[in-house]
Amino acid sequence: MTRLQSRGIPTETRKIVRYSYLDRQFAGPAALRTLFEGVESVVKSGQFTLGKEVERFEAFLAARCGARFAVGVASGTDALILAMRACGIGDGDEVITAPNSFIATAGAIAQTRARPVFVDVREDYTIDPAQIVGRITPRTRAIIPVHLTGLPADMDPILDIANRHRLHVIEDASQAIDAVYRGRPSGSLGVAAAFSFHPLKNLNGWGDGGAVTTNSEEIAEQLRLWRNHGLVNRDECAFFALNSRLDSIQAALLLKLAENMDDVTEKRIRNAALYDHLLSDLQPFVTIPPRREDVRQVFHTYVLQVKFRETLIPFLSDRGVETKVHYPIPIHLQEAARHLGYRRGDFPVSERQAGAILSLPIHQYLEEDEIRYVADQIRQFYSNCALPS
Ligand SMILES: Cc1ncc(COP(=O)(O)O)c(C=O)c1O
């Protein structure tokens, strides 16, 4: 008897369901050929920095987001930093964001020398607008709502607060290309929005990449300076800045990969709906966050809350299902945030969720039987647990 059979799974029904999809996305010469064409055109042109491919990608992204401008930069983190810089945020300012994001959101704020100020999240993992006003001080300059998991934050009340208090709203849309809030695409909702094209994002390059979208010509112009040494032209520099250009080869790849964007988005939404359906009766062991009617959530991640997570993860792994936790330590409890003075208990929702969240494989290459298999394994795990009466 094999080890797996002894665990109740005959080897012939066992599947391997990996979290990452890169092995499928770039499998085979056909998938690579068109991508290499894009790379070849950059190499042949000799235009390795900025140039035509970056401009074409920026035009694509701006149109996709319903924004007037997009400016390609080196990463999502730089997109956040430069968006803040272009809004004049820096030393001594405070910027409000959520503590349950990827560390880069707060890291970017700190890199501008502003202070991250956290506000707890709702059950759907997005910042709670009702708690924002209480954190505004005379130093507050901006709010960065994070569209975590690909779900837009509740932007209308946030924009309303920002208007009343004269604050900038910069979307952290790193996980949210193609997401829509009340008919408006992510990337068009605030004064600027940051996107990431990290290899594991829904639109993913072969390395780091990012962009800022904005409707403001002035901010777009500032961003173009900030990403390119502050150079107005070849010889004249307006201010000291960075080299944070979107790599031209990445831009060429992203343009090719973007041709499948509709498919990527639709499949992730379809996969999530199937999981929701298959797992909905596993309450209270499995909690699916509330699904909102006023958004299109694009499921960069599919994040449940589960009981007995530390046992469930190895159980699923033994059955070939790879899972992740995004993110197990809220930012305010990280060593890096110690100087900000937060304590455990300050953000009860984020802290409770951090102990229970689990990300299932959700990518666009999953087959229906793989999703059913994952759901079956979760069901099996809880089959011996008694429901509380
Ligand atoms: C919510 C969020 N913000 C910021 C970032 C930073 O993006 P990057 O890794 O491209 O710097 C990421 C992704 O990694 C993210 O998920």
Image: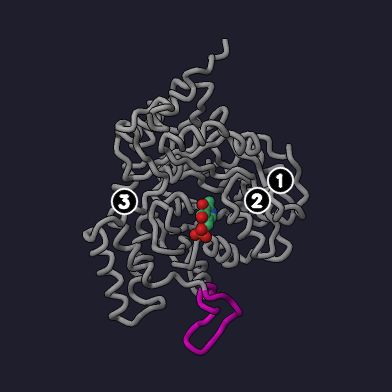
Residues shaded magenta = 226-243
Task: State the residue position of label 3.
Answer: 24
Q: Where is 209 relative to 342, above or below?
A: below
According to the picture, the residue beneath numbered tag 2 turns out to be 96
- Outermost residue on the top side: it is 389
Three-letter amino acid code of the residue under disc 1: Arg
Residue 191 makes an appearance in the image? no
Residue 324: percent from left, percent from top: 50, 43
Q: Are marks 1 and 2 in contact (CB under 8 Å)?
A: yes
Name which of mark 2 and mark 3 comes first in the sequence: 3
Crowd rating for badge 3 (residues with CA inside 10 Å; few <14, some 14–19, many 20+):
few
Q: Tell me which residue sits at (31%, 57%) in the image.
A: 26
Is tag 1's residue or tag 2's residue first in the polypeptide sequence? 2
Instruction: Provide the secondary structure element on which disc 2 rests.
Output: strand
Q: Which residue is mark 1?
A: 135
Nearest the camera: 375 or 247? Answer: 375
